[in-house]
Amino acid sequence: MGGLGRAMTEPFETGTFAGTDIACIRGERLLFRGLGFALEPGGALVLTGPNGSGKSSLLRLLAGLLPPAHGELTWNGRPVAADREAQRARLLYLGHLEGLKPTLTVGEMLDLHARLRGRPTDPADALAALGIDGLVDVPGRLLSAGQRRRVGLARLLVCPAPLWLLDEPTVGLDAAGLAAFRAIAAAHRRAGGAIVAATHAELGLAGADNLAPADFAPDWATDGAALEAVLGAVA
Amino acid sequence: MSALSLAFWAVLARDLRLGLRHGSDIAMVVSFFVLAAVLFPFGVGPEANLLTRISAGVVWVTALLAAMLSLDRLFQADYEDGSLDQLALSPAPLAVIVLAKAAAHWLTTGLPLIVVAPALGLMLRLDPAGFVPLVLAMLVGTPSLSLFGAIGAALTLGARRGGALVALLVLPLVLPVLIFGVAAVEAAVTGLGARPHLLILGALLAAALPLAPLAAAVALRQALESA
């Protein structure tokens, strides 16, 4: 059976994730406009740039938590806005915060995550891949910053999905944690998954494209004369 | 089990577990309920006739205020620690998750209040004919408090002094629950029968059950956009 064989080797349907002419407004500030990218299966996109240039905002926008002020995101050419639930099933987002509860154990939190995605699974393999298999019964309040990060990364493995959106995934990780991250990221890309990661550190994603939201910041955000020209054009 | 009910039960179980492990939250709501009701005999005097007349109203009003106390934490903790992002990004509709959270809120606040209410009725010299209608009215009425409360809690997410704001938003919305909840007891005591009032409370709940989670889900997405 072709379908079964495919399910055995590929845990998810791969696809091309692309954005065209994306603009993002936070508060009353236009962070970037005209931003575009295309991410093939197995590809990686590293978001770089100074603090406040819009890396985290772009990740939240890609995750669908923030609607783009302009432009369109597509999955295999179809707009993701047409089927939000299917798009949410395709992506896994790891933000600054891991969403851990002080009184819930690591096992309980990963179990909740798997059930929310409709697939109860044993988290043992995911925890082992991050080197934290001993933490299953440890409540969130006892975890160190690096351990919390590893639990956040383990969530990516519990229920496989083709698109990973990672905000500073290696902050707080030690050398072994960094090596574990590189190993799971490489395995994910070998399986046809794609990664978008915002970072200030070297993630070791081979052949990754770079994207700096700051390059798409409007020049009139800093240039008064240009701003007046734009406002004049609008008026 | 379908993915939808799997998500519903998972969130319900999580919030119940969190509520029980932070047992102090439940204890605080119940103690507030008891203390506020105990203040009334001191305030209006221990005269039995007067207490009998106001007892249903006092129990309902204090239950309402006690439920408000716990509402501001309904989404706030999840919002602050990032788990709301994860809930909002799960493939299940956010309204289903809101419904699960409202159900957990009712089980950890509404239900304990109902258990304590007859004892308060006894203290306030509630007419013996009023006890069963009081419990029935609270059973049908307090879930609406949790559902309307979820809208208020979602709307005030991220706001300063969210707790006071939730009460200001939600208390006017739940006035019908208070009116018919008290009327059910009064009607039973005067021999008119509580049934029509209980049916209206049921109708309110039937409307809130599908609509409140949808409204709260929209408000939550709005809050996450500005996160």
Image: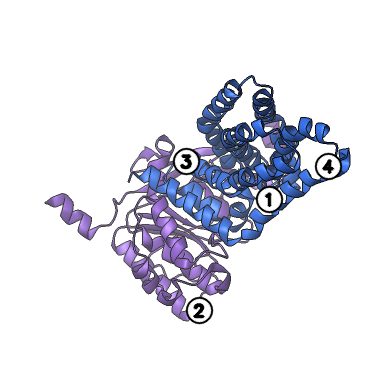
Chain colours: A purple, B blue
- The amino acid type of the residue labelled 4 equals Pro
**Numbered disc 2: secondary structure:** loop
In this orientation, which residue lies closer to the viewer: B196 or A171?
B196
**Residue at horizontal 67 percent and vertical 34 percent from the top:** B128
Q: Please state the total of marks drawn on the protein image.
A: 4
Left/right placement of residue B106 relative to residue B33 reads: left
Q: Which residue is the site of mark 1?
A: B30
- The amino acid type of the residue labelled 2 equals Asp
Q: How crowded is mark 2: few (under 14 residues within 10 Å), some or many (20 or more)?
A: few
Q: Which residue is the site of mark 2?
A: A174
- The residue positioned farthest toward the bottom in the image shown: A175
Q: Position of residue A5 (x, y in %)?
A: 16, 56
Q: Which chain carries label 3?
A: B
**Numbered disc 4: secondary structure:** helix
In this orientation, which residue lies closer to the viewer: A232 or B44?
B44
**Numbered disc 3: secondary structure:** helix
- The amino acid type of the residue labelled 3 equals Val
Q: Which residue is the site of mark 3?
A: B96
- Determine the CA span between mark 3 and mark 2: 39 Å
Looking at the rendering, which quadrant does residue B149 occupy?
A: top right
Q: Which residue is the site of mark 4?
A: B41
Same subunit under labels 1 and 2? no
- Determine the CA span between mark 3 and mark 1: 27 Å
Q: How crowded is mark 3: few (under 14 residues within 10 Å), some or many (20 or more)?
A: many
Which of label 3 and label 1 is nearer to you?
A: 1
Of mark 3 and mark 1, the one earlier in the sequence is 1
Disc 2 + disc 4, Cβ < 8 Å: no
**Residue at horizontal 29 percent and vertical 53 percent from the top:** A12
- Determine the CA span between mark 2 and mark 4: 63 Å
Q: Which chain carries label 2?
A: A
- The amino acid type of the residue labelled 1 equals Val
Of mark 4 and mark 3, the one earlier in the sequence is 4
